[in-house]
Image: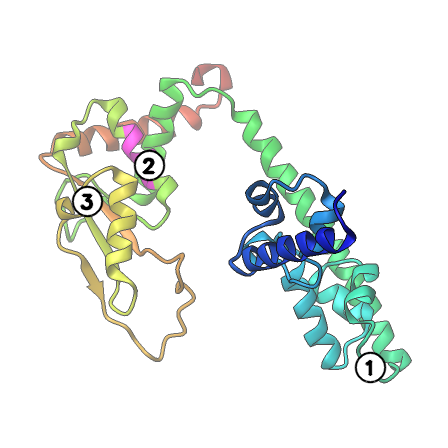
Amino acid sequence: MTSIHSKYADFEHLQAQAVALRREGLSLRQIRDRLKIHNNDILGRLVQGEPPPEWTKRPNAKDDLREQARELRLKGLTYDQIQVELGCSKSSISLWVRDLPKPDRRDSKEQAKLAARKRWDHELAIRDGARQETKAAAAREIGFMSERELFLLGVGLYWSEGAKAKPHNPQERVSFINSDPHMVGLFLAWLDLLGVARSRLRHQVHIHENANVPSAEQFWAGIVGVDVGALGKTVLKRHNPKTNRKNVGDGYHGCLNVRVLQSADLYRRIEGWWYGIVGAALMPDPQSRT
């Protein structure tokens, strides 16, 4: 019969092995498989007091919020104020900061301001949701676009945004410049409909000199589907420090000019199409417009 001392010695031997494996960074499952210990209670006793390795700890998605909440609490913010800042529940905030000192009591004016801010934030969220739904519903109203609809839309688009012959500059050529990638994409789709080969197109970025020029070139090259090296030389606009420009930041890509080579005849047809649209739209009899 195995003596008590022998059993204790076996346990100490296993414990030493388990602790050594734990300190090497093994998980409980790995230690169990390595030492062939299939009793979880015994396994827990063997490594009792040894912290689990970092890699076995599950990340907590709220860890960052918890730290932010504690920082705000130390600055004197109340539960309501922290909730407004972080958007998390008061119960979570209470759990995270309960060991920290309470801030001084707010006066009634501050409470009223906070309540008003919360009501306004809620109202803004409702308004934004309504705006987005209105836009989405309007987009669904368009549905399928026929070739004729795209043709007429493209004529109007060019005549409002494209280059036009002037008395002081009678040159007739098709050139379209815009900062909106959707407008540029629509213009290219219209040219495709007209059968204008992409090989006849030339692209050139126009942008302020203090902007991120390489990023803008990469952006527009992606929009039109060409390599950056295929773009023409970028036109840099001089920066006026006295001007308070609003078109700055990562979302600013300047404008793209799309020019069609050998396009005098196309330009004349565009002008004719435009005045044909004007004449049809202004007819006194609506049935004559179809």
Magenta stretch secondary structure, dominant: helix
Answer with mark 2 or mark 3, whichever residue precedes in sequence: 3
Dot 2 alpha-carbon crowd within 10 angstroms: few under 14, some 14 to 19, many 20 or more: few
Q: Is residue 19 above or below residue 230?
A: below
Using the image, determine if residue 211 lies above or below residue 203.
below
- The residue wearing badge 3 is 165
Q: Which residue is drawn at 62% across and 48% down?
A: 28
* Horizontal arrangement in the rendering, residue 89 relative to residue 24 (left or right): right
Q: Which of marks 2 and 1 is in front?
A: 1
Q: Quick one: 48 or 90, which is closer to the camera? A: 48
CB-based contact (under 8 Å), mark 2 and mark 3: no
Residue where numbered disc 1 is placed: 101
Q: Dividing the image into 4 quarters, which one contains the C terminus?
A: top left
Point out the stretch of residues depicted in magenta: 184-190
Hey, what amino acid is under mark 1? Pro
Q: Which amino acid does label 2 sit on?
A: Gly
Q: Are marks 2 and 1 in contact (CB under 8 Å)?
A: no
Q: Nearer the viewer, mark 2 or mark 3?
A: 2
Earlier sequence position, callout 3 versus callout 1: 1
- Horizontal side of 40 relative to 199 (left or right) equals right
Q: Position of residue 105 (x, y in %)?
A: 88, 82
Residue 237: x %, y % from top left: 23, 65
Q: Which residue lies furthest to the right in this view?
A: 108
- Which residue is the extreme one toward the front? 1
Name the residue carrying label 2: 185
Neighbor class of circle 3 (other Cα within 10 Å; few <14, some 14-19, many 20+) is some
Displayed quadrant of residue 79: bottom right
Q: Is mark 1 on a helix, strand or loop?
A: loop
Residue 15 horizontal/vertical position (percent): 65, 56
Type of amino acid under label 3 = Ala
